Image (tube, rainbow, N blue to C red):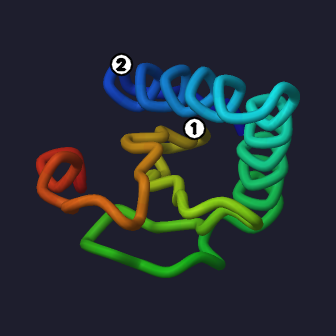
Amino acid sequence: MKVRFVFPANIEFDEAVRYYDHQLPGLGFRFFQQVDAAIERIRFMPEAWTKIDHRTRRCILKGFPYALFYAIEKDDILITAVAHLHREPEYYRNRII
């Protein structure tokens, strides 16, 4: 399955990597690795993760307070949010499909 990020999710991902790199050198790369690992888990079992809405599911990252919100579209996985779980959820709610 091909994985695509919607534009806001791509920005969230980039900002989180930069933030963690600023906190501790190399931590941004560890965050990147956890996102990559979560994507691989989603690819392997796309329907195994918590269903949030009609088409949206959530996969929580290991070791970071983030989750990937995604939808399955034919043979693609569409990442709609790279969401920090301790923030107000309103900033990504409009991307839940």
Q: Are marks 2 and 1 in contact (CB under 8 Å)?
A: no
Give whichever of 55, 19 is nearer the camera. 19
The residue shown at (17%, 47%) is 91
Classify residue 24 by image quadrant: top right
Give whichever of 3, 11 is nearer the camera. 11
Which residue type carries mark 1?
Asp
SS at mark 2 in the image? helix
Comes first in the chain, label 2 or label 1? 2
| Mark 2 surroundings within 10 Å by alpha-carbon count, few (fewer than 14), some (14 through 19), many (20 or more) | few
* Residue placed under numbered mark 2 in the picture: 7
Is residue 40 toward the left or the right of residue 15 in the image?
Answer: right
The residue shown at (75%, 65%) is 63
Which residue type carries mark 2?
Phe
Instruction: From this view, report whether residue 11 is shown above or below residue 52.
Output: above
Instruction: From this view, report whether residue 47 is shown above or below residue 43.
Output: below
- The residue mark sitting in front, 2 or 1, is 2
Which image quarter holds the C terminus?
bottom left
The residue shown at (17%, 55%) is 93
Where in the figure is residue 71, as x and y percent of width and height? 43, 52
Where in the figure is residue 11, as x and y percent of width and height? 42, 20
Which image quarter holds the N terminus?
top right
Classify residue 17 by image quadrant: top right
